[in-house]
Image: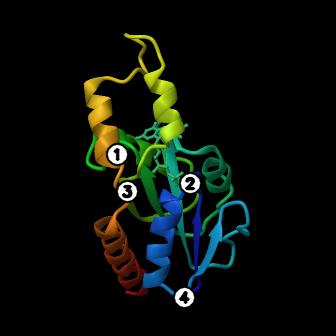
Amino acid sequence: MKIMIVYSSKTGNTQMIAQAIHQEIPGAELFSVEDAPSPEGFDLLVFGFWVDKGTADDAARDYLQGVGTTPTALFATLGAYPDSDHARESMERATALLSGAPLAGSFICQGAVDVGLQEWMKSLPPGHPHGPTEERLRRWRDASTHPDERDCEAARVWARGLIREERS
Ligand SMILES: Cc1cc2nc3c(=O)[nH]c(=O)nc-3n(C[C@H](O)[C@H](O)[C@H](O)COP(=O)(O)O)c2cc1C
């Protein structure tokens, strides 16, 4: 089975998950989205993005829109909690970009939020919708250690299941 893993990553979180998945599927070809060829001719695309404004980041969106019919499994990292509505909706929005490709599975975990973005949000005036609420500060703190080894192991387990499913 020909498998390609492609990831879009700004600060390294999604790349870390892509590498964990690659450890589980060492025969797969691994590319960053900037260098990735078309998935045409592959049996499975395993594609990772970082969540930006509640959907896949721009580079990931561009790539996903051109995927064609290759079965695709999606993984992502985000600052929000992975079991939140926001995580589910972000994954749904990314899935909707796959117009002709069947979704083979999905995986999402938390990823540390860029410190520069945090500093900018902390500088916003009180009451600003993107300002640093207690809840947001707690979420950033919780995200700051992710992806961790448990996330990487969960991604490897997910990839194992994916391959088993595709082969059956
Ligand atoms: C400009 C920007 C926008 C972001 N938007 C969201 C968002 O809408 N929801 C969210 O949960 N996390 C958001 N994040 C957090 C990232 O999705 C998260 O830190 C991710 O793990 C980054 O992945 P990377 O290290 O692979 O770039 C945002 C981060 C940045 C820098």
Which image quadrant is residue 28 in? Answer: bottom right
Q: CA distance from mark 4 to mark 1?
A: 29 Å
Q: Which residue is mark 2?
A: 98
Quarter of the figure that contains the C terminus: bottom left
Circle on res. 1:
4
Looking at the image, do the residues carrying marks 3 and 1 touch, with CB atoms under 8 Å apart? no
> Which residue occupies 30% across, 39% down?
139
Residue that carries the numbered disc 1 in the rendered image: 88
Placement of the N terminus among the 4 image quadrants? bottom right
Please determine whether, in this image, residue 95 is positioned above or below residue 136.
Answer: below
Q: Amino acid at mark 3?
A: Ile
Q: Are marks 4 and 3 in contact (CB under 8 Å)?
A: no
Mark 1 close to ligand 1, CB under 8 Å: no
Task: Tell me the residue that label 3 is attached to.
Answer: 108
Q: Is residue 81 visible?
A: no
Q: Residue at x 47, y 61 (%)?
A: 74
Marks 4 and 2, Cα distance to the nearest angstrom?
21 Å
Give the secondary structure at mark 2.
loop
Nearer to us in this view, 145 or 71: 145
